[in-house]
Amino acid sequence: MITKGKELPTYEELEVQDVNLSSPFLKAGSFHLGKQCEAENNEFMLCRLEEKDPRKCLNEGKVVTSCTMKFFQAVKRSCAEEFYNFAMCLDKSSQDMSFDTCRKTQTIFDTCMKEKVGIERPHFGYFCEPRVHATARPQPMPELPPVFPDALVEPPPDDIPRQPSRHQGRPIFF
Amino acid sequence: MSGTTIKQDLPPPGGYKPINYLRVPAKTYFSGVQMFVLFNVVTFGGLYIWSYTHEKLKRLKTEDRASRLALQPMLYAEKDRLYMKRLRKLREEEEELMKDVPGWVVGTYWGEPIYQTRPENEWHEIQVTEYMAHSPHYKQQYINNFFKWL
Protein backbone atom coordinates (compact mmCIF):
# COMPACT_ATOMS: atom_id res chain seq x y z
CA MET A 1 0.00 0.00 0.00
CA ILE A 2 0.98 3.62 -0.42
CA THR A 3 1.84 5.70 2.62
CA LYS A 4 1.04 9.38 3.12
CA GLY A 5 4.69 10.31 2.72
CA LYS A 6 4.82 9.09 -0.87
CA GLU A 7 4.22 11.93 -3.27
CA LEU A 8 1.57 11.24 -5.86
CA PRO A 9 0.37 13.64 -8.56
CA THR A 10 -3.05 15.12 -7.99
CA TYR A 11 -6.11 14.22 -10.04
CA GLU A 12 -5.85 17.49 -11.95
CA GLU A 13 -2.30 16.71 -13.00
CA LEU A 14 -3.33 13.26 -14.16
CA GLU A 15 -6.38 14.43 -16.06
CA VAL A 16 -5.48 14.36 -19.77
CA GLN A 17 -7.70 13.69 -22.74
CA ASP A 18 -6.89 10.13 -23.74
CA VAL A 19 -6.97 8.62 -27.20
CA ASN A 20 -10.44 7.17 -27.50
CA LEU A 21 -9.88 4.66 -30.31
CA SER A 22 -10.26 0.90 -30.58
CA SER A 23 -7.46 -1.47 -31.50
CA PRO A 24 -8.07 -1.80 -35.29
CA PHE A 25 -7.89 1.99 -35.65
CA LEU A 26 -4.76 2.14 -33.50
CA LYS A 27 -3.16 -0.64 -35.50
CA ALA A 28 -4.14 0.98 -38.79
CA GLY A 29 -2.46 4.24 -37.82
CA SER A 30 0.43 2.76 -35.86
CA PHE A 31 3.22 3.05 -38.45
CA HIS A 32 2.56 6.66 -39.38
CA LEU A 33 1.98 7.51 -35.72
CA GLY A 34 5.30 6.01 -34.71
CA LYS A 35 7.07 7.92 -37.48
CA GLN A 36 5.38 11.20 -36.61
CA CYS A 37 5.92 11.03 -32.82
CA GLU A 38 9.25 9.21 -32.90
CA ALA A 39 11.24 11.72 -30.81
CA GLU A 40 8.52 12.04 -28.17
CA ASN A 41 8.05 8.28 -27.94
CA ASN A 42 11.77 7.62 -27.62
CA GLU A 43 12.10 10.29 -24.95
CA PHE A 44 9.24 8.80 -22.93
CA MET A 45 10.41 5.21 -23.22
CA LEU A 46 13.99 6.16 -22.30
CA CYS A 47 12.71 8.05 -19.26
CA ARG A 48 10.54 5.13 -18.26
CA LEU A 49 13.37 2.64 -18.52
CA GLU A 50 15.96 4.81 -16.79
CA GLU A 51 13.98 6.29 -13.94
CA LYS A 52 11.73 3.29 -13.19
CA ASP A 53 9.30 5.77 -11.66
CA PRO A 54 6.07 6.84 -13.43
CA ARG A 55 5.89 10.06 -11.43
CA LYS A 56 9.05 11.42 -13.03
CA CYS A 57 7.89 10.66 -16.58
CA LEU A 58 4.46 12.24 -16.27
CA ASN A 59 5.22 15.24 -18.47
CA GLU A 60 6.87 13.10 -21.14
CA GLY A 61 3.80 10.87 -21.13
CA LYS A 62 1.53 13.88 -21.55
CA VAL A 63 3.61 15.01 -24.52
CA VAL A 64 3.27 11.53 -26.05
CA THR A 65 -0.51 11.55 -25.61
CA SER A 66 -0.94 15.03 -27.02
CA CYS A 67 1.25 14.14 -30.03
CA THR A 68 -0.89 11.05 -30.61
CA MET A 69 -4.08 13.10 -30.37
CA LYS A 70 -2.70 15.62 -32.84
CA PHE A 71 -1.76 12.87 -35.26
CA PHE A 72 -5.17 11.21 -35.23
CA GLN A 73 -6.89 14.58 -35.57
CA ALA A 74 -4.79 15.26 -38.66
CA VAL A 75 -5.73 11.83 -40.03
CA LYS A 76 -9.39 12.54 -39.39
CA ARG A 77 -9.14 15.88 -41.14
CA SER A 78 -7.35 14.61 -44.24
CA CYS A 79 -7.81 10.87 -44.78
CA ALA A 80 -10.84 9.92 -42.71
CA GLU A 81 -12.50 7.64 -45.25
CA GLU A 82 -9.34 5.81 -46.27
CA PHE A 83 -8.40 5.37 -42.61
CA TYR A 84 -11.83 4.02 -41.75
CA ASN A 85 -11.78 1.56 -44.64
CA PHE A 86 -8.31 0.32 -43.72
CA ALA A 87 -9.27 -0.16 -40.07
CA MET A 88 -12.48 -1.98 -40.96
CA CYS A 89 -10.52 -4.24 -43.32
CA LEU A 90 -8.05 -5.04 -40.53
CA ASP A 91 -10.90 -5.73 -38.14
CA LYS A 92 -12.96 -7.98 -40.37
CA SER A 93 -10.56 -9.75 -42.73
CA SER A 94 -8.64 -11.98 -40.37
CA GLN A 95 -8.63 -13.22 -36.82
CA ASP A 96 -5.38 -11.56 -35.79
CA MET A 97 -5.80 -8.21 -37.59
CA SER A 98 -3.15 -9.22 -40.09
CA PHE A 99 -1.78 -6.59 -42.47
CA ASP A 100 -1.41 -9.28 -45.12
CA THR A 101 -5.08 -9.38 -46.06
CA CYS A 102 -5.41 -5.60 -46.34
CA ARG A 103 -2.65 -4.50 -48.70
CA LYS A 104 -5.06 -2.76 -51.10
CA THR A 105 -6.72 -0.49 -48.53
CA GLN A 106 -3.33 0.01 -46.89
CA THR A 107 -1.84 1.29 -50.16
CA ILE A 108 -4.73 3.72 -50.61
CA PHE A 109 -4.30 4.98 -47.03
CA ASP A 110 -0.52 5.28 -47.46
CA THR A 111 -0.78 7.34 -50.63
CA CYS A 112 -3.36 9.60 -49.00
CA MET A 113 -1.13 10.11 -45.94
CA LYS A 114 1.87 10.84 -48.15
CA GLU A 115 0.03 13.35 -50.31
CA LYS A 116 -2.13 15.18 -47.78
CA VAL A 117 -0.39 14.84 -44.41
CA GLY A 118 3.14 14.35 -45.66
CA ILE A 119 4.11 11.27 -43.65
CA GLU A 120 5.68 8.37 -45.46
CA ARG A 121 5.13 4.86 -44.19
CA PRO A 122 8.39 3.39 -42.84
CA HIS A 123 9.46 -0.08 -43.88
CA PHE A 124 7.97 -3.09 -42.13
CA GLY A 125 10.64 -3.57 -39.47
CA TYR A 126 11.41 0.06 -38.74
CA PHE A 127 10.23 0.02 -35.13
CA CYS A 128 11.98 -3.26 -34.35
CA GLU A 129 15.37 -1.68 -34.94
CA PRO A 130 17.36 -0.49 -31.94
CA ARG A 131 18.25 3.18 -32.02
CA VAL A 132 20.16 5.70 -29.96
CA HIS A 133 18.25 8.64 -28.55
CA ALA A 134 19.94 11.85 -27.45
CA THR A 135 18.14 13.54 -24.56
CA ALA A 136 18.58 16.68 -22.47
CA ARG A 137 17.39 14.95 -19.30
CA PRO A 138 20.31 14.06 -16.99
CA GLN A 139 20.95 10.39 -16.46
CA PRO A 140 19.93 9.18 -13.00
CA MET A 141 22.94 8.28 -10.90
CA PRO A 142 23.24 4.78 -9.44
CA GLU A 143 22.46 4.49 -5.77
CA LEU A 144 25.41 5.03 -3.41
CA PRO A 145 26.42 2.13 -1.17
CA PRO A 146 24.85 2.31 2.32
CA VAL A 147 26.80 3.96 5.13
CA PHE A 148 26.81 2.39 8.60
CA PRO A 149 27.91 4.98 11.20
CA ASP A 150 28.42 2.46 13.99
CA ALA A 151 30.62 0.12 11.94
CA LEU A 152 34.20 -0.47 13.09
CA VAL A 153 36.82 1.35 11.06
CA GLU A 154 39.25 -1.56 11.13
CA PRO A 155 38.90 -5.08 12.42
CA PRO A 156 39.80 -5.53 16.13
CA PRO A 157 43.17 -7.08 17.01
CA ASP A 158 43.35 -10.81 17.27
CA ASP A 159 44.55 -10.93 20.89
CA ILE A 160 41.57 -9.33 22.60
CA PRO A 161 40.49 -11.24 25.72
CA ARG A 162 37.86 -13.84 24.85
CA GLN A 163 35.31 -15.12 27.31
CA PRO A 164 34.46 -18.80 27.44
CA SER A 165 30.99 -19.42 26.08
CA ARG A 166 28.25 -19.21 28.65
CA HIS A 167 26.08 -22.08 27.45
CA GLN A 168 28.69 -24.68 26.55
CA GLY A 169 29.09 -23.35 23.01
CA ARG A 170 28.32 -25.07 19.80
CA PRO A 171 28.91 -28.70 19.09
CA ILE A 172 31.87 -29.33 16.88
CA PHE A 173 30.04 -30.30 13.76
CA PHE A 174 27.60 -27.41 13.55
CA MET B 1 -27.69 -103.74 -46.00
CA SER B 2 -27.20 -105.54 -49.29
CA GLY B 3 -29.39 -103.10 -51.26
CA THR B 4 -27.42 -99.94 -50.36
CA THR B 5 -24.79 -98.49 -52.76
CA ILE B 6 -21.54 -97.13 -51.30
CA LYS B 7 -19.92 -94.06 -52.88
CA GLN B 8 -16.21 -93.80 -52.32
CA ASP B 9 -14.84 -90.24 -51.77
CA LEU B 10 -12.30 -89.82 -54.53
CA PRO B 11 -10.25 -86.99 -56.12
CA PRO B 12 -11.90 -85.10 -58.98
CA PRO B 13 -11.34 -86.46 -62.42
CA GLY B 14 -7.89 -85.52 -63.63
CA GLY B 15 -6.57 -85.30 -60.05
CA TYR B 16 -6.07 -82.40 -57.59
CA LYS B 17 -4.46 -79.16 -58.73
CA PRO B 18 -0.81 -78.83 -57.82
CA ILE B 19 -0.15 -77.02 -54.49
CA ASN B 20 1.01 -73.43 -55.01
CA TYR B 21 4.08 -73.21 -52.87
CA LEU B 22 6.13 -70.80 -55.01
CA ARG B 23 6.83 -67.28 -53.56
CA VAL B 24 5.20 -64.45 -55.52
CA PRO B 25 7.25 -61.27 -54.84
CA ALA B 26 5.56 -57.80 -55.04
CA LYS B 27 6.14 -55.83 -58.15
CA THR B 28 9.12 -53.45 -57.82
CA TYR B 29 8.71 -49.95 -59.22
CA PHE B 30 12.01 -48.43 -58.03
CA SER B 31 15.40 -49.65 -57.12
CA GLY B 32 17.00 -48.68 -53.79
CA VAL B 33 19.17 -45.94 -55.24
CA GLN B 34 16.21 -44.50 -57.10
CA MET B 35 14.13 -44.40 -53.89
CA PHE B 36 16.97 -42.76 -51.97
CA VAL B 37 17.37 -40.09 -54.62
CA LEU B 38 13.61 -39.52 -54.81
CA PHE B 39 13.35 -39.12 -51.01
CA ASN B 40 16.12 -36.53 -50.94
CA VAL B 41 14.72 -34.62 -53.89
CA VAL B 42 11.25 -34.42 -52.32
CA THR B 43 12.56 -33.49 -48.87
CA PHE B 44 15.00 -30.81 -49.83
CA GLY B 45 12.86 -29.50 -52.66
CA GLY B 46 10.00 -29.13 -50.19
CA LEU B 47 12.24 -27.34 -47.71
CA TYR B 48 13.38 -24.97 -50.44
CA ILE B 49 9.79 -24.12 -51.39
CA TRP B 50 8.80 -23.80 -47.71
CA SER B 51 11.61 -21.32 -47.08
CA TYR B 52 9.76 -18.77 -49.22
CA THR B 53 6.65 -19.10 -47.04
CA HIS B 54 8.81 -18.91 -43.95
CA GLU B 55 10.36 -15.66 -45.11
CA LYS B 56 6.91 -14.22 -45.74
CA LEU B 57 5.65 -15.28 -42.31
CA LYS B 58 8.72 -13.80 -40.66
CA ARG B 59 8.11 -10.50 -42.41
CA LEU B 60 4.49 -10.49 -41.30
CA LYS B 61 5.41 -11.22 -37.69
CA THR B 62 8.02 -8.48 -37.72
CA GLU B 63 5.49 -6.06 -39.13
CA ASP B 64 2.98 -6.88 -36.40
CA ARG B 65 5.65 -6.49 -33.74
CA ALA B 66 6.74 -3.14 -35.19
CA SER B 67 3.14 -1.98 -35.14
CA ARG B 68 2.79 -2.92 -31.48
CA LEU B 69 6.11 -1.30 -30.55
CA ALA B 70 5.06 1.92 -32.25
CA LEU B 71 1.91 2.02 -30.14
CA GLN B 72 3.58 1.02 -26.91
CA PRO B 73 4.64 4.49 -25.62
CA MET B 74 1.14 5.89 -25.99
CA LEU B 75 -0.44 2.93 -24.22
CA TYR B 76 2.17 3.00 -21.45
CA ALA B 77 1.61 6.71 -20.88
CA GLU B 78 -2.12 6.11 -20.46
CA LYS B 79 -1.56 3.10 -18.26
CA ASP B 80 0.82 4.94 -15.94
CA ARG B 81 -1.63 7.78 -15.43
CA LEU B 82 -4.48 5.38 -14.69
CA TYR B 83 -2.26 3.48 -12.27
CA MET B 84 -1.32 6.61 -10.32
CA LYS B 85 -4.95 7.73 -10.22
CA ARG B 86 -5.89 4.37 -8.81
CA LEU B 87 -3.16 4.53 -6.16
CA ARG B 88 -4.35 7.92 -4.97
CA LYS B 89 -7.93 6.67 -4.88
CA LEU B 90 -6.92 3.59 -2.89
CA ARG B 91 -5.06 5.72 -0.36
CA GLU B 92 -8.02 8.03 0.10
CA GLU B 93 -10.34 5.06 0.44
CA GLU B 94 -8.18 3.52 3.14
CA GLU B 95 -7.94 6.82 4.97
CA GLU B 96 -11.71 7.16 4.94
CA LEU B 97 -12.28 3.56 5.98
CA MET B 98 -9.82 3.49 8.90
CA LYS B 99 -10.30 7.02 10.26
CA ASP B 100 -12.01 5.78 13.46
CA VAL B 101 -9.39 3.16 14.28
CA PRO B 102 -6.82 4.52 16.75
CA GLY B 103 -3.22 3.61 16.01
CA TRP B 104 -3.77 2.80 12.36
CA VAL B 105 -1.36 4.51 9.96
CA VAL B 106 -2.37 4.64 6.30
CA GLY B 107 -0.25 2.47 4.05
CA THR B 108 1.29 0.51 6.91
CA TYR B 109 0.31 -2.32 9.23
CA TRP B 110 -0.22 -0.55 12.59
CA GLY B 111 2.71 1.72 11.77
CA GLU B 112 4.96 -0.97 10.31
CA PRO B 113 5.79 -0.10 6.68
CA ILE B 114 6.39 -2.61 3.88
CA TYR B 115 9.97 -1.50 3.20
CA GLN B 116 11.69 -0.44 6.40
CA THR B 117 15.13 0.48 5.07
CA ARG B 118 14.04 2.33 1.93
CA PRO B 119 13.24 6.05 1.77
CA GLU B 120 9.55 6.72 2.07
CA ASN B 121 9.23 8.63 -1.19
CA GLU B 122 10.87 5.90 -3.26
CA TRP B 123 8.63 4.33 -5.88
CA HIS B 124 7.52 0.73 -5.54
CA GLU B 125 4.85 -1.30 -7.26
CA ILE B 126 1.92 -2.71 -5.31
CA GLN B 127 0.48 -6.23 -5.36
CA VAL B 128 -2.59 -7.18 -7.37
CA THR B 129 -4.52 -7.97 -4.18
CA GLU B 130 -3.71 -4.49 -2.88
CA TYR B 131 -4.70 -2.96 -6.20
CA MET B 132 -8.09 -4.68 -6.06
CA ALA B 133 -8.48 -4.31 -2.26
CA HIS B 134 -11.75 -2.35 -2.26
CA SER B 135 -13.30 -4.10 -5.27
CA PRO B 136 -15.93 -6.84 -5.28
CA HIS B 137 -14.76 -10.42 -5.42
CA TYR B 138 -15.73 -11.08 -9.03
CA LYS B 139 -13.54 -8.20 -10.19
CA GLN B 140 -10.59 -9.56 -8.23
CA GLN B 141 -11.19 -12.92 -9.88
CA TYR B 142 -11.35 -11.23 -13.27
CA ILE B 143 -8.00 -9.51 -12.74
CA ASN B 144 -6.42 -12.70 -11.41
CA ASN B 145 -7.59 -14.74 -14.38
CA PHE B 146 -7.08 -12.12 -17.04
CA PHE B 147 -3.87 -13.68 -18.35
CA LYS B 148 -5.86 -16.70 -19.51
CA TRP B 149 -7.50 -14.54 -22.14
CA LEU B 150 -4.20 -13.45 -23.64
Image: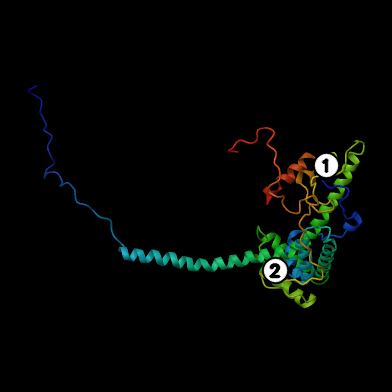
- Dot 1 lies on which element? loop
- Dot 2 lies on which element? helix
Q: Quadrant of residue B79?
A: bottom right
Q: Classify residue B101 as left or right of residue A64.
A: right
User: Where is residue A150 shown, x and y percent of the image?
Assistant: 80, 49
Residue visible at 78% across and 61% down?
Answer: A51
Protein chain holding label 2: A
Residue visible at 86% across and 51% down?
Answer: A6
Q: Nearer the viewer, residue B61 or A50?
A: A50
Determine if marks 1 and 2 fall on one subunit: no
User: Where is residue A97 shown, x and y percent of the image?
Assistant: 68, 61
Picture colour scheme:
rainbow
Protein chain holding label 1: B
Per the image, the residue denoted by label 1 is: B112
| Residue that lies at the very extreme toward the top in this rendered image | B1
Q: Is residue B143 above or below residue A66?
A: above
Per the image, the residue denoted by label 2 is: A127
Spatial distance from mark 1 to mark 2, Cα to Cα? 46 Å
Residue A82 visible from this viewpoint: no
Residue visible at 68% across and 66% down?
Answer: B66
Amino acid of disc 2: Phe
Amino acid of disc 1: Glu
Residue visible at 61% across and 35% down?
Answer: A171
User: Where is residue A44 shown, x and y percent of the image?
Assistant: 79, 65
Q: Quadrant of the C terminus of chain A?
A: top right
| Residue that lies at the very extreme toward the left in this rendered image | B2
User: Where is residue B57 shown, x and y percent of the image?
Assistant: 59, 65
